[in-house]
Image (cartoon, helix red, strand yellow):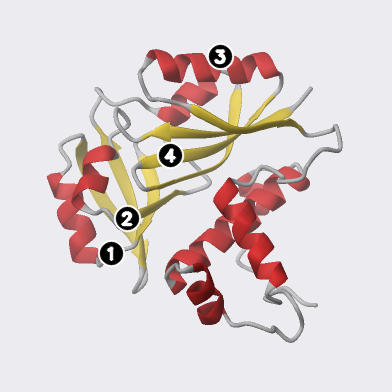
Amino acid sequence: MTSIVNLEISGDGTGLAELFDAVPSLTCEAEAAIVSNGYDLWLSGASRSELEAGLEAASPIEEYTLINGSEEEWLYNVRFSSETTDLFELVLEEDGTILDASAVDGSWVLNIRVQDRSDASSIYDELEDRELEPTIIRLYETDNGNRSQAGLTERQYETLVAAANHGYFEIPREVSMQELSEELEVSHQALSERLRRAYRSLVTSELDVTTEEAEPTPSSTLSD
């Protein structure tokens, strides 16, 4: 029976801890497609110069290349040393599928789809053996009707509830993104990123699609 496990994992041992030490405000989100020659990571929460100084200072990072970016967020291909744990490879080896991966405050948060709860136990045990301090935030079966949080992290769930309660999803909106960010005491950018990750988690878990399927094609158009 297919299940979704939402895991929080320490950045220590995965190559991110030193980067977060150098850039404490860092927010990191993995691209939907994980490539074999490193991680494609969207980095934000600091200026580009601060991020690249952190990338240079983090000894587990062997190489990084800027792929794309804007004024507030940049996509880098990051290659870690062989001494670090490759979380994505580990999950794949244990028959899991990563639906969403992000990191903030020095920890990874992964949404993983598994075919059986025993697979979730195997992933947890592997992470624990590597001293990555895994914590299961939520584990639920996708077909038992119990989807109160639909694979969302606690922070994403609380943000969506607050947005709904304040009328952010009404037409017209009863509160702006800036007003909502002030109410939640987070930056406008952090709120935007949190909502985007929450939307993607909802799509991938509720519609039972992969993150690649959830991404719009260049020719896609949306309407009411």
Q: Secondary structure at mark 4?
A: strand
The disc at residue 26 is 2
Q: Pinpoint residue 6: horizontal percent, then vertical percent.
A: 59, 35
Instruction: Give the Cα distance between marks 2 and 1.
Output: 6 Å
**Alpha carbon separation for disc pair 2 and 4:** 12 Å
Residue 55 place in picture, x, y as percent: 20, 49
Q: Earlier in the sequence, mark 4 or mark 3?
A: 4
Q: Nearer the viewer, residue 131 or 42?
A: 131
Whichever of labels 1 and 4 marks the residue nearer the N terminus, that label is 1
SS of the residue at dot 3?
helix
State if disc 1 and disc 2 touch (CB < 8 Å). yes
Q: Nearer the viewer, residue 26 or 181?
A: 181
The residue wearing badge 3 is 122
From this view, report whether residue 71 is shown above or below residue 172. Answer: above
Q: Is residue 215 visible?
A: no
Residue type at mark 2 is Leu
- Are the residues flagged by discs 1 and 3 in contact, CB closer than 8 Å? no
Dot 2: what SS? loop
Tell me the residue that label 1 is attached to.
46
Kind of residue indicated by mark 4: Trp
Residue located at (75% from left, 26% from top) = 2
